[in-house]
Image: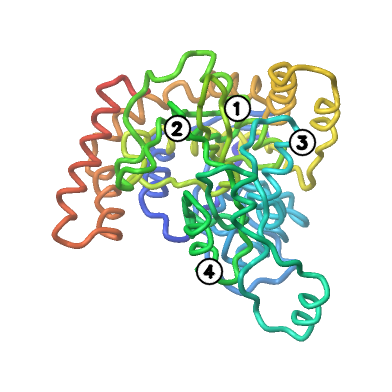
């Protein structure tokens, strides 16, 4: 028994701001956590992309993955690490690869969530291949998109079944607009989904392990204003409901880190977009909420690495389906789904761990977000996204919103 080091790898793409803050803060925390007779320390390293021997051991205990959803080399390296080296990864790469928005809609409909009416539409165009033409000639039926819209109800949304950061999402009010959007959709397989008209709240709930944060969202605002800075906009009951919905989805699909968008109409919360297992983590969109995100990265990473939390290599949906089959109101089913999720995320153990070993994190974070290092992280991200003449203006804007977070008591 003695000093041991847990190695945390950051598998990154265009991320700039949160990894810099993560690295600075873990040094400032200066952790020496007793666990199973050892004293656990932590080292953070950025994962490089290079050829690898399938039998070469992975040096990391945990990897925070920001590439699996699109960069295949890193995805396959991560799969190898999970299968052969007991690597823990945010998130399950097989689930990200296989479970797109279409699957998530179907599964949550089965669990009884009030998902808006959704249809799948065959693509307008096809990539040429030998079997495509005979297949379509024999089996593809002509359809009237206007009648589909009449059935779903106008207005509705046309959007790719597999998502893609608002890619090709179009709100259409009639058959003419629907056909125009469809003609422009090329080879994308599309969903037609009813619009939740008359909603009074649009909330994005971020889930990171058992941690959740509800953010009032304005989809019509510029990107830097979509995450509003309001904090007291939900009742305790609504906040708890959205926590249960988000953790249910995340536990079902094996996603440590995901976000769920929900609209409230007539007191009912309708989840509309919740297959986002690489959520936006940038200060340029999160601003006021960015320090919470960094702290959440730290808490869940440190807990999982310190305790050698086991990666669930496969998904077990049966406990959820067993609840779905019960003759119970949806609210009672959701309570049971959330209990499964809390067990899978070890919520009680996590909270006890944080209280015992990370009680100083809030103070460290509040102090860190006054430093030149923190402001430089903001500036670097702004510089990467904005034209030179706007860098100073937006650096100061996002920095002022972080200071508003501190003034509000670091919520």
Q: Earlier in the sequence, mark 4 or mark 1?
A: 1
3 and 4 marks in contact (CB < 8 Å): no
Q: Earlier in the sequence, mark 1 or mark 3?
A: 1
**Residue receiving disc 1:** 34
Q: What element carries label 3?
A: helix
10 Å crowding of disc 4: few (<14), some (14-19), many (20+): few
**Residue receiving disc 3:** 110
State the residue at coordinates (75%, 82%). 133
Give the Cα distance between marks 4 and 1: 61 Å
4 and 2 marks in contact (CB < 8 Å): no
Closer-to-camera residue (157/375): 157
State the residue at coordinates (49%, 49%). 44
Give the Cα distance between marks 4 and 2: 30 Å
Camera-near label (2 vs 1) is 2
State the residue at coordinates (49%, 64%). 180
Quadrant housing residue 231: top left
Camera-near label (4 vs 2) is 4
Q: Which of marks 2 and 1 is nearer the N terminus?
A: 1
Camera-near label (4 vs 1) is 4
**Residue receiving disc 4:** 183
Q: Earlier in the sequence, mark 4 or mark 2?
A: 4
10 Å crowding of disc 1: few (<14), some (14-19), many (20+): some
- For the question of whether residue 227 can be seen, the reply is yes
Measured as percent of width and height from the top left, residue 106 is found at: 72, 43
Closer-to-camera residue (25/147): 147
- For the question of whether residue 5 can be seen, the reply is no
Give the Cα distance between marks 3 and 2: 23 Å
Measured as percent of width and height from the top left, residue 282 is found at: 38, 47
**Residue receiving disc 2:** 202
Q: Is mark 2 on a helix, strand or loop?
A: strand
Give the Cα distance between marks 1 and 3: 43 Å
Closer-to-camera residue (324/214): 324
């Amino acid at each position: 028994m003695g000093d041991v080091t847990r190695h945390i790898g950051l598998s990154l793409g265009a991320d700039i701001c949160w990894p810099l803050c993560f690295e600075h803060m873990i040094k400032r925390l200066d952790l020496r956590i007793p666990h199973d007779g050892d004293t656990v320390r932590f080292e953070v390293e950025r994962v490089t992309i290079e050829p690898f021997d399938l039998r070469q051991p992975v040096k990391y205990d945990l990897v925070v993955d920001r590439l699996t959803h699109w960069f295949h080399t890193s995805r396959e390296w991560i799969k190898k690490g999970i299968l052969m080296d007991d690597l823990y990864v945010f998130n399950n790469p097989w689930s990200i690869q296989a479970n797109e928005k279409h699957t998530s809609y179907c599964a949550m409909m089965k669990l009884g969530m009030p998902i808006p009416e959704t249809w799948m539409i065959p693509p307008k165009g096809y990539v040429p291949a030998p079997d495509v033409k005979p297949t379509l000639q024999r089996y593809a039926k002509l359809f009237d998109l206007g009648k589909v819209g009449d059935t779903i109800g106008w207005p509705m949304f046309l959007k790719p079944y597999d998502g893609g950061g608002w890619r090709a999402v179009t709100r259409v009010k009639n058959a003419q607009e629907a056909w125009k959007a469809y003609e422009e959709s090329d080879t994308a397989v599309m969903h037609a989904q009813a619009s939740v008209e008359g909603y009074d709240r649009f909330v994005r709930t971020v889930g990171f392990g058992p941690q959740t944060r509800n953010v009032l969202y304005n989809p019509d605002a510029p990107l830097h204003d979509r995450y509003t800075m309001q904090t007291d906009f939900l009742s305790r009951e609504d906040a708890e409901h959205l926590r249960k919905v988000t953790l249910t989805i995340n536990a079902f699909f094996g996603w440590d880190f995901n976000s769920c968008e929900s609209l409230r109409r007539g007191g009912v919360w309708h989840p509309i977009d919740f297959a986002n297992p690489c959520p936006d983590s940038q200060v340029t969109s999160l601003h006021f909420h960015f320090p919470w995100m960094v702290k959440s990265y730290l808490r869940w990473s440190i807990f999982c690495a310190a305790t050698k939390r086991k990666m669930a290599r496969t998904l077990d949906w049966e406990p959820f389906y067993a609840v779905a089959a019960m003759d119970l109101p949806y609210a009672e089913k959701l309570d049971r789904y959330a209990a499964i999720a809390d067990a899978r995320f070890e919520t009680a153990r996590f909270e006890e761990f944080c209280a015992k070993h990370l009680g100083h994190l809030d103070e460290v974070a509040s102090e860190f977000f006054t430093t030149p290092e923190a402001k430089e992280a903001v500036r670097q991200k702004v510089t990467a996204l904005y034209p030179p003449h706007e860098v100073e203006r937006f650096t100061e804007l996002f920095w002022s919103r972080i200071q508003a977070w501190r003034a509000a008591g670091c919520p």
